[in-house]
Every structure is written in structure tokens, then in C-alpha cells.
Amino acid sequence: MKTSKFILITVMLLGILVLPSCLNDDDDINLTYPNALVTVKEAADETVFFQLDDNTTLLPVNITSHPFKSKEVRALVNYNELDDASGVYDKSVHVNWIDSIRTKPMAPNLGDQNDDEYGTDPVEIVNDWVTIAEDGYLTLRFRTVWSNLGITHYVNLIPTNNPANPYEVEFRHDANGDHKSGRMGDGLVAFKLDDLPDTEGETVKLKLIWKSFSGEKSAEFDYRTRSATIASSAIAAERSVIPIN
């Protein structure tokens, strides 16, 4: 059931899906780095749009077909806002490039089998702008040891089934034996949180726990069950910012 696979990602994005840009070379904008983390969605009329946060939608005017085969995924994007009409969406934007990150559902808590199934290898969760709970997802930038052998790493998010806190989840990492030597590197993953109880419009504290290199750690995020948006397609697993096995 080890369904998430990762290879080390570099600081510079590779394999970026580049879209035609109307920007001139002299424009004062850095196109190398993302300036937003979004959920890529598709409306019932097949219009592609982005959910920027819990409340804001973006209409990418230069995307005429879904870049990820109609899959709902989290993605890094570089865009600039336009004054064009946006219809039912909040803003219109021109996309300079976009690249999906690994997006998947939560995994079930298997009790005594969790260690064998999901691993116990350490990671650090990076306090970064892409480490956030929004639009019904928990997106995490994590850091661990990677060799240069191309060995697959597996990550999962499971509920702890804590009766005192239904919004407590645990990040699990199975390095597949690839943790004894190498260098530190980062990965990105997003988990859809619709297995958690509905917060019924309230904002609650989502508690994340994980095994770090110095012992168990935890962090809290503001979390609210995602509101209904324009009808979009179902979630499906996608790749990280470079291809995975």
C-alpha cells in the first residue's frame, strides 16, 4: 500500500510546464521562482481555474485546456494579474509557468501495522510558505537524507484516531533503506483532508505530528473544511516537481 513515491527535488524547479509569456525581458519580475501555491480545478463547463486560498479563485486566461489531464492537483505557479474580465472568478491572471506537486488522499490508520506499512524514518517539516493547510489540503515541504542512488521514498499522512482530537494527523516516511548516507534534500507533497470531520464552517487547529531527527515533533495549522466551489473533477495522484517512478 506504499503509494507515494519521491525522488529528491532540487531548489530550482525542473521539468516546469512553461506557458507563453507576454512579459518583456526588462519586466521587473523573477520568473524562476513560484509566486503562488494553488489548487488546479476544472469547472463543470471544463473551464480551468485556480483556488488561490480558502476564498480566492483565479481565471488563467492563457490556459485553454487542463494541463494535468483533468486531475485536481496542488501546483506551484508563477503568474501576473491582469485587468481582463474574470466572470464568476475573483481575478484573471496570465500564467508564466505551472508545475504540479505530488497530491494524494490520506491513508488509513492501520494500528499495529502502521510502522511496517508506512515506515518510521525521520524527516524535518520545513517552516515555509508552502507548508500550509488551505482549500482542504495540507501541503508540506519536508527534508530528509537522500542518496544519489535513485531509491524510492514513500510518504503518507494518516489520522491518529485520537479520541480527544479528531483533527490530529501523523506524517509517515519510509526511506526504503535510503537513510544511512547521502545529503539533506527537500520534497513537496499535498494531502487532501476530506477524511477528517467537517468543521462546519469553523476554523480549528489541525495538529500534525512527525518523527524528526531529534525525536517527535508537532505543529498546528489553522484548518477549515473546504467550502463548495464551482464543480471540479475528482482528486487523483500527480507527480512531484520532477518526475517520480
Image (tube, grey):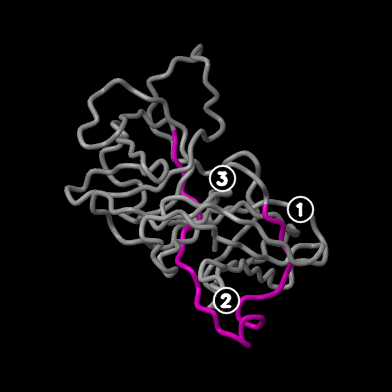
Magenta range? 97-125
Residue 189 shown in magenta: no
Residue 63 place in picture, x, y as percent? 30, 37
Type of amino acid under label 2: Asn
Which sits earlier in the primary sequence, circle 1 or circle 3? 3
Horizontal side of 237 relative to 159 (left or right) equals left
| Whether label 2 touches label 3, CB < 8 Å | no
Residue 95 place in picture, x, y as percent? 39, 32
Q: CA distance from mark 2 to mark 3?
A: 26 Å
State the mark number for residue 130: 3
Give residue 50's quadrant in the image.
top left
Horizontal side of 131 relative to 50 (left or right) equals right
Seen at 43% across and 44% down, the residue is: 38
- Packing grade of label 3 (10 A; few <14, some 14-19, many >=20) is some
Residue 119 shown in magenta: yes
Type of amino acid under label 1: Met
Which of the two discs, 1 and 2, sits closer to the camera? 2
User: Which quadrant is the C terminus positioned in?
Assistant: bottom right
Q: CA distance from mark 1 to mark 2?
A: 32 Å
State the mark number for residue 162: 2
Which sits earlier in the primary sequence, circle 2 or circle 3? 3
Type of amino acid under label 3: Val
Which one is in front, 92 or 8? 92
Residue 199 place in picture, x, y as percent? 41, 61
Give residue 220's quadrant in the image.
bottom right
- Packing grade of label 1 (10 A; few <14, some 14-19, many >=20) is some
Residue 190 place in picture, x, y as percent? 51, 56
Horizontal side of 206 relative to 216 (left or right) equals left
- The residue under label 1 is 184
Label 2: element kind: loop
State the mark number for residue 115: none
- Residue at the top extreme? 26
